Amino acid sequence: MAMYKGEFDITKTIRIIERLKSQLLSNVSALFSNMAESNSANSNENIDILADVIILSYLLSDKLGVSNEALDIKLINKLRLASLQNEENEEWTKEILTLSKHLNKSREIK
């Protein structure tokens, strides 16, 4: 049976998605392990891992057909909704609004 270019592209995309999922899971596992150790020396490593998780999430969303802009808009909308739903928890709402402002500012820079 001959393999057509479209079939090869689908197989390649599936492999990339599986690799991204695996890396994402590995990074989350490493982050949880570092958090369990509660070693302050892990702080820089945790920052690297969190950055990797965000990058992998954007790459995975792209492979799933979701643009970076659509993902950003969804994040901002979810944060707005969360801030409205969590009004009774002032500290949590403040953190959500701070993150929302950060994302909005990042979008303005582009």
Image (cartoon, rainbow, N blue to C red):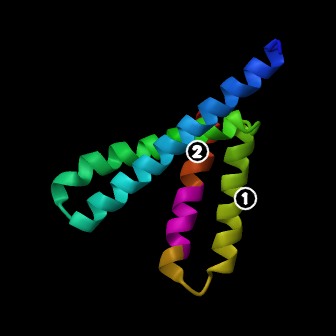
Provide the residue span drawn in magenta.
93-100
Q: Secondary structure at mark 1?
A: helix
Q: Where 68 sits versus 53, above or below?
A: above
Q: Going 60% across and 30% down the picture, which residue do you hit? A: 16
Majority SS type along the magenta span? helix
Residue on which the image places disc 1 = 77
84 or 33, which lies in front?
A: 33
Q: Where 81 sits versus 47, above or below?
A: below
Q: Where 20 sits versus 45, above or below?
A: above
The N terminus - image quarter? top right
Mark 1, other Cα within 10 Å: few <14 / some 14–19 / many ≥20: few
Residues under numbered marks 1 and 2 in contact, where contact means CB atoms less than 8 Å apart: no
Residue on which the image places disc 2 = 105
Q: Quadrant of residue 38?
A: bottom left
Give the Cα separation between the discs numbered 1 and 2.
14 Å
Horizontally, is 25 left or right of 14 in the view?
A: left
User: What residue type is disc 2 on?
Assistant: Lys
Q: Quadrant of residue 13?
A: top right
